[in-house]
């Protein structure tokens, strides 16, 4: 793979003055402070997060991956995506979950807002994403763009970066030019990124259609699979993701118990009503008919319960309360962790 520059010593960029946003967000997304083992194998989903600056092409790429226009994608100088959004599709019989994010790391976004969205992103990708797609458009690469990229790379720790893929959008702007020819004249910062990511990059035309679209989608998802394989089939997780997952499971359990209680109540009511009616009936055939009706209604209730059981986790995730709970939980956790920082 092209590595056009001799590898320079990686330095902490100077815009990263230790500040609350950087330190807190790094605690959210960076290296885990405790080791733990979650079960990775047998995970049927492939969870992807699109990160990058406003207008980089995250939503357009998400739509392309899912083969459907599910995320709003238009040309605008201001951020179109306001909150993290999750949509699903399939690839090789596997469920693909794509989370589109707003320009989380645009330098002018306030702290509290950023942290709230990071929390939402963690909720939507819990127990952890398999791949983080860092979206950068080909074309002019300003100092501000460079800073935004550096900020993202710094916030996600070394281990999260193993799950990161560099995704260059606007491949169509290259016209007939080969990407490697383009690289030779590309800004040094882009050449450095390629060196850093080695083979974990792809060049994408998010507006492509037909065979071109299918081929590049296939190549991208195969690259994601490759990255996951290199991480021994694991998705990225850390102790804060684990806390998030524990809370989701706890709340899902509570919801399931509520659903179960509702089911039992509804079944008892159906039985009581039918049994009263059956007792009053003299005709055995009529009694039998009512019994059949009762069994049917009980079965319908059970089926309804099964479907609610299946959506319980999503029901929890769609409530605003969980966002607030996790946000508070993670803020407390960040504070506690900050006590143990070197
Ligand atoms: N020609 C071309 N246009 C693209 C490509 N990718 C994205 N765009 C366009 O770039 C503009 C911005 O794309 P979005 O997908 O909305 O960017 P975003 O990163 O999601 O932006 P926010 O939602 O504001 O954070 C849209 O007009 C897209 O159609 C690409 O590969 N080629």
Image: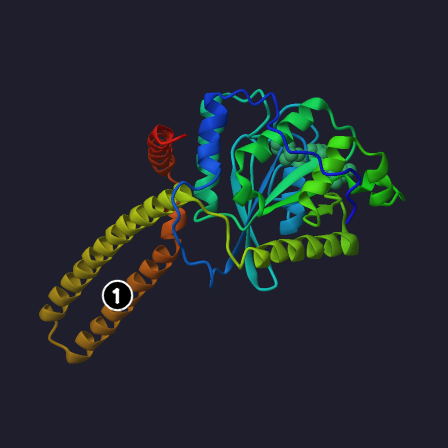
Colour logic: rainbow
Q: Nearer the viewer, residue 109 or 181?
A: 181
Task: Name the side, left or right, on which 205 lies relative to 265.
Answer: right
Report the image quarter containing ligand 1: top right
Could you say whether the residue bearing mark 1 is in a helix, strand or loop?
helix
Vertical side of 47 occupied by 41: above or below = below
Q: Residue visible at 70% across and 23% down? A: 143
Q: Quadrant of the C terminus?
A: top left
Tell me the residue that label 1 is attached to.
298
Task: Name the side, left or right, on which 288 lies relative to 80.
Answer: left
- Residue 169 image point, x, y percent: 73, 40
Q: Residue visible at 63% across and 28% down? A: 148
Task: Name the side, left or right, on which 205 lies relative to 227.
Answer: right
- Residue 54 image point, x, y percent: 64, 29
Residue reaching furthest bottom?
Answer: 284
Q: Residue visible at 44% across and 28% down? A: 24
Among the 4 quarters of the image, the one containing residue 108: top right
Query: In this rendering, does residue 266 appear at all?
Result: yes
Q: Nearer the viewer, residue 126 or 66?
A: 126
- Residue 57 image point, x, y percent: 68, 37
Residue reaching furthest right?
Answer: 176
Among the 4 quarters of the image, the one containing residue 73: top right
Query: In this rendering, does residue 53 appear at all?
Result: no
Vertical side of 337 occupied by 133: above or below = below
User: Mark 1 vs ligand 1: CB under 8 Å?
Assistant: no
For mark 1, does the 10 Å Cα neighbourhood hold few (<14), some (14 to 19), or many (20 or more) residues? some
Q: How many marks?
A: 1
- Residue 126 image point, x, y percent: 44, 47
Q: Nearer the viewer, residue 119 or 191?
A: 191
Task: Name the side, left or right, on which 213 lies relative to 226.
Answer: right
């Amino acid at each position: 793979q092209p590595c056009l520059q001799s590898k320079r010593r990686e330095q902490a960029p100077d815009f990263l003055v230790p500040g609350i946003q950087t330190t807190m967000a790094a605690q959210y997304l960076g290296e885990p402070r405790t080791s733990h083992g979650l079960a990775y194998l047998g995970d049927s989903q492939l969870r992807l997060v699109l990160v990058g600056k406003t207008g980089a092409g995250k939503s357009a790429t998400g739509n392309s991956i899912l083969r459907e226009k599910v995320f709003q994608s238009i040309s605008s100088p201001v951020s179109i995506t306001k909150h993290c959004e999750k949509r699903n599709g399939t690839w090789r019989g596997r469920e693909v979950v794509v989370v589109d994010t707003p320009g989380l790391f645009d330098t002018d976004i306030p702290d509290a807002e950023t942290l709230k969205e990071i929390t939402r992103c963690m909720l939507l990708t819990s127990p952890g994403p398999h791949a983080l797609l860092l979206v950068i458009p080909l074309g002019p690469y300003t100092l501000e763009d460079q800073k935004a990229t550096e900020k993202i790379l710094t916030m996600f720790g070394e281990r999260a970066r193993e799950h990161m893929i560099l995704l260059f959008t606007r491949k169509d702007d290259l016209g007939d030019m080969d990407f490697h020819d383009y690289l030779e004249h590309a800004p040094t910062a882009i050449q450095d990124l390629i060196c850093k990511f080695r083979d974990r990059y792809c060049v994408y035309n998010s507006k492509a259609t037909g065979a071109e679209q299918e081929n590049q989608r296939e190549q991208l998802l195969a690259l994601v699979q490759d990255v996951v394989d290199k991480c021994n089939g694991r998705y990225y997780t850390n102790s804060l993701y684990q806390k998030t997952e524990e809370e989701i499971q706890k709340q899902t359990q509570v919801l399931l118990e509520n659903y179960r209680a509702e089911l039992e109540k509804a079944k008892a009511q159906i039985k009581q009503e039918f049994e009263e009616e059956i007792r009053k009936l003299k005709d055995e055939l009529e009694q039998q008919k009512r019994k059949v009706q009762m069994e049917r209604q009980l079965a319908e209730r059970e089926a309804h319960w099964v479907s609610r059981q299946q959506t319980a986790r999503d029901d929890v995730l769609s409530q605003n309360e969980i966002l607030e709970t996790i946000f508070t939980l993670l803020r407390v956790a960040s504070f506690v962790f900050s006590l143990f920082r070197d």
